[in-house]
Image (tube, rainbow, N blue to C red):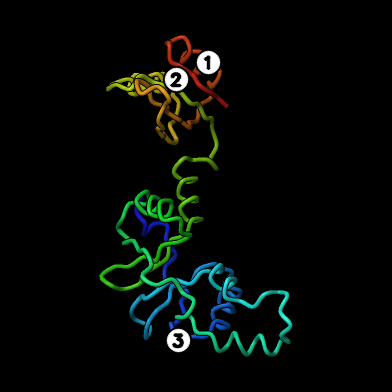
């Protein structure tokens, strides 16, 4: 799956010269947490998050009157509080590449840029949704996890067993095992013979870690 399949197109954005108050209003109006920051509506120059705004806002304990607070918020410009030179990703990048950037850089979103032009935005939530869809979590069926020997052909042996019992594979995922000689395989599938298939898997000598 590529970023283009999960990103939000035509994202709401602010100009670097817009006020902090305008940014706050946009976040609230669209119920979002991040705003790409543009220069003259063309060049991406930063990213502004809900957290940035909270850090720049007057303390709740301030003695300022509400009209004075609004005056200050209208004077502070987005370019004064935004994060400059944000990390970006292209629309054709694999979704896992974007997930790795977000995890390693500890950020909440990635503006999507193609040929210097902002075409979308990808958030943590979008990546989680992609993971849920890819794993078939919301779909019908069953889930089993097996620790297979980490060598060619073992997964194929298992899948042949699924075919024998007319089981439809919904998703297959792998994860590292504590033993380097093994690898965890998580399989979601549909079948009318779940108990019989599970018994056949055990009888065939596969290491069944969990089943539900």
CA distance separating discs 2 and 3: 64 Å
CA distance separating discs 3 and 1: 66 Å
- Would you call the spot at circle 2 few (<14 residues within 10 Å), some (14-19), or many (20 or more)? some
Establish if 170 lies above or below 60. above
For mark 3, what is the residue?
17
Q: Earlier in the sequence, mark 3 or mark 1?
A: 3
Q: Quadrant of residue 110?
A: bottom left
Disc nearest the viewer among 2 and 3? 3
- Would you call the spot at circle 1 few (<14 residues within 10 Å), some (14-19), or many (20 or more)? few
Where is residue 194 shown, x and y percent of the image?
54, 22
Q: Earlier in the sequence, mark 2 or mark 1?
A: 2
For mark 2, what is the residue?
165
Q: Earlier in the sequence, mark 2 or mark 3?
A: 3
Residue at image point 44% right, 82% down: 15
Residue at image point 31% right, 73% down: 117
Disc nearest the viewer among 3 and 1? 3
Location of the C terminus (image quadrant):
top right
Residue at image point 55% right, 43% down: 138
Q: Secondary structure at mark 3?
A: loop
Q: Quadrant of residue 83?
A: bottom left
Residue at image point 58% right, 77% down: 24
Q: In the rendering, which numbered label is found on residue 196?
A: 1
Q: Secondary structure at mark 2?
A: loop
Judge left or right: residue 114 versus residue 189.
Answer: left
């Amino acid at each position: 799956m590529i970023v283009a399949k999960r990103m939000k197109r035509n994202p709401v954005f602010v100009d670097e010269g817009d006020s902090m108050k305008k940014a706050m209003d946009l976040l609230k109006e669209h119920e979002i947490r991040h705003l790409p920051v543009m220069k003259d509506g063309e060049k991406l120059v930063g990213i502004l998050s809900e957290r940035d705004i909270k850090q720049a806002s007057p303390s709740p304990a301030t003695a300022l009157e509400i009209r004075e607070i609004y005056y200050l918020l209208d004077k502070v410009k987005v370019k004064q509080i935004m994060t400059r030179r944000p990390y970006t990703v292209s629309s054709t990048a694999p979704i896992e590449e974007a997930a790795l950037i977000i995890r390693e850089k500890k950020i909440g979103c990635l503006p999507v840029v193609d040929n210097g032009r902002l075409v979308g935005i990808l958030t943590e939530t979008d990546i989680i949704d992609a993971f849920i869809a890819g794993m078939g979590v919301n779909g019908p069926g069953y889930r089993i996890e097996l620790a297979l020997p980490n060598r060619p052909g073992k997964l194929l042996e298992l899948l042949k067993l699924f075919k024998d019992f007319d089981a439809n594979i919904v998703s297959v995922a792998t994860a590292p095992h504590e033993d380097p000689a093994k690898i965890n395989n998580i399989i979601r599938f549909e079948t009318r013979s779940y108990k019989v298939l599970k018994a056949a898997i055990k009888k065939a000598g596969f290491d069944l870690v969990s089943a539900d």
